[in-house]
Amino acid sequence: MTSQFRGTKAVVAEGFFSSGGLDMLLVDVMPPGQRVQSKRRPRFDVDGYFGIHRFWMRAHQFGLPLQRAIIDLTRRQRSMAQSPSAYAAWSKDDLIARINSLESALLNAPGVTPNAIPKPMHHPRAPQMADVISASVAGASTSGHKKIKTKPPKPFDFSAYPRRKIALKFCYSGWEYNGLAFQTEPTPLPMVEAVILNALEECRLIDPAGGFDGCGWSRCGRTDRGVSAAGQVAALWVRSAIGVGKIKRLEEITASTAAELGATSLDDGLPGPPTAESSPTSQSISRTSSPPAQPELRYVNMLNSVLPRSIRVLAWSPVTDTFDARFSCTYRHYKYFFTASIPPHPYIDPSHSSSSLLNIEAMRDAASRLVGVHDFRHFAKMDPSKQIENFTREIHHATISTCNSSPTPIPRSSGNNTQPLDTQMYVFDLIGNGFLWHQVRHIMGILFLVGSGMEKPFIVDALCNTGIDPSIPTLESLPIVSTKPTYEMADGLPLVLWECGYREGDVMWRVDDTTSTNPASASNVSGIGKASPAAQQHIYPPFHQTSQQHLIKYTLLNHFSLAATVHHPLMTGSSAAPLGAGTSVQASREKYVNVLNRPRGEKVAELNEKWKTGAGARKLARRAAERAEKDAAADPPTTA
């Protein structure tokens, strides 16, 4: 038997490879030392594979000449080439069962080890029968088989690209977020900055390893939960396309930024090189003879394509290295939207509607008293951890006007009278050089009390009459209010950070423009920008969809109230003080206590000192311990 195998292995390896019904597997399952290899790899099919094993097993078990088995197999292969294979009609489960039975028979054959049975290979997709056979063939060859190595994705090398500092102007719907500022602790809703950070990393504009600290992130105005923004501004370092592929490219970015902002050029058309302090890297800088020809990255379109619809990037601007979105800002403009109704208006009988509407003129009188330089400590929420001692701010503009975007009110009926109640939308515009924490919402809380008749307009003067700041004159006709009385601030939903102002030349807002030859690939937004259709599709459709959804909800809820009047009569009056966005606080006019007669809080100096000796001291101690631990780990003591 052994001589038969040794005498025919050459025929097996060479002669029948050309028949298409034999493979290296026949040689591999032979006893060790009797295997031969061939460089020829024939076409392989299922019947040839199992047929050669069956005839080899019979020749090995019953002592039949192997040549006879090979001849029979060849005849069978030729007959099968003229007629369809019997396995073609088999199902997948039947074929798998057949394979398992043949492998079991092979294991029971004398001289066959488990390692001689071909092992299946794993495929990333659902394997077909051809995959199983091909994998078995590839796994059976122990000498000529090469494993396919999948290369891991190549990491993005941020150091191979230049960086530039830009400012981003963006808007967001505050009711979908837990606020603007990034938080390390879990929050009920996502933070706006966290979502933007993920978008910047996904677009590979900033290095994920550095985060906000690595890109030098700065924001203009921090907004709390529920507060929206139409013109928020942030500044950061991002990847740039100017000078890509060139060794010395930092000057090109600086030159482009200076030229776009109107800087004076040198004889060669470029400003001088940046200083070492302003450069984002320590690489050397060489002069170039002309501005770069390639366009800048389309920052607006890139970010809007990955950001959620509730956050939209409106424009970007090149800025200098020293630009800071917060400290470079000269003014901030806030808007607060409200209706003249007092909750639960408009579900009040029209005959009593006069007592359910705010006195807009009185509110305008009170708002006008805010203009100027005042001590606004009683219009803010105290935060001793900030250790703030200066509460003097200047208000440039404070007005209340109608807002024409209000939808048509639904008529209300009472008996035989059907008339629309006043659901006109108003907006309070407030512009100042700076604002304290929750200052706008505290101001609106006082204005609502004035509009509802609970307070007189002079309450604004009285709350500003602290007598603490010597630079602000004290009003002798009003009492001095040295500590803050308790009162409710307005809801945050109607509040919007409308605009962040900067000095002329600090920013030059632009949008993506695929047709521009400007290296910044953008056009000025001072007029109508030449934005690409793709950029426009990322801006207006989301706004329209959201506004239509809210308009439909508004209409449905108004019709729900009409349906309720069939079973429930309208109310005859209101004893609530509005807080904005339909919220209110119960305030009976008979039992109402004026703000100046309410309990007062502690003085700011006392609150700061209490925090400094209490929670602040513990916080400083923890920081000192952490620093000492880090220093000890970085510089372990040496033993003599």
Image (spheres, grey):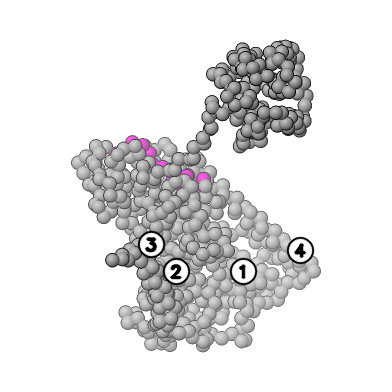
Which residue is label 2 attached to? 398
Quarter in which the N terminus is drawn: top right
Mark 2–mark 4 contact, CB under 8 Å?
Answer: no
* Number of residues whose C-alpha sits closer than 10 Å to that of mark 2, classed few (under 14), some (14–19) or many (20 or more): many
- Badge 3 marks a residue whose secondary structure is loop
Asked which secondary structure carries label 4, the reply is: helix
Residue 210 image-quadrant placement = bottom left
**Camera-nearest residue between 93 and 361:** 93
* Label whose residue precedes the other's in the sequence (4 or 3): 3
Q: Which residue is mark 3?
A: 326
Asked if labels 3 and 2 touch by Cβ distance under 8 angstroms, the answer is no
**Which residue corresponds to mark 1?**
582
- Which class describes the residues within 10 Å of circle 3: few (<14), some (14-19), or many (20+)? some
Q: Secondary structure at mark 1?
A: loop
Label 2 to label 1, Cα distance in Å?
23 Å
Name which of mark 2 and mark 3 comes first in the sequence: 3
Q: Does the magenta stretch mainly form a helix, a strand or a loop?
A: loop
* In the rendered image, the vertical position of residue 141 relative to residue 397, given as above or below: above
Q: Would residue 74 be found to the left or right of residue 476 on screen? A: right
Residue at the far left in the pictured view: 267
- Cα–Cα gap, marks 4 and 3: 50 Å
Q: Decide whether residue 566 is among the magenta residues.
A: no
Mark 2 or mark 4: name the one nearer the start of the chain: 2
Residue occupying the point 51% across, 64% down: 185
Q: Quadrant of residue 68?
A: top right
* Left-right relation of 212 to 581: left
- Tell me the tag on residue 563: 4
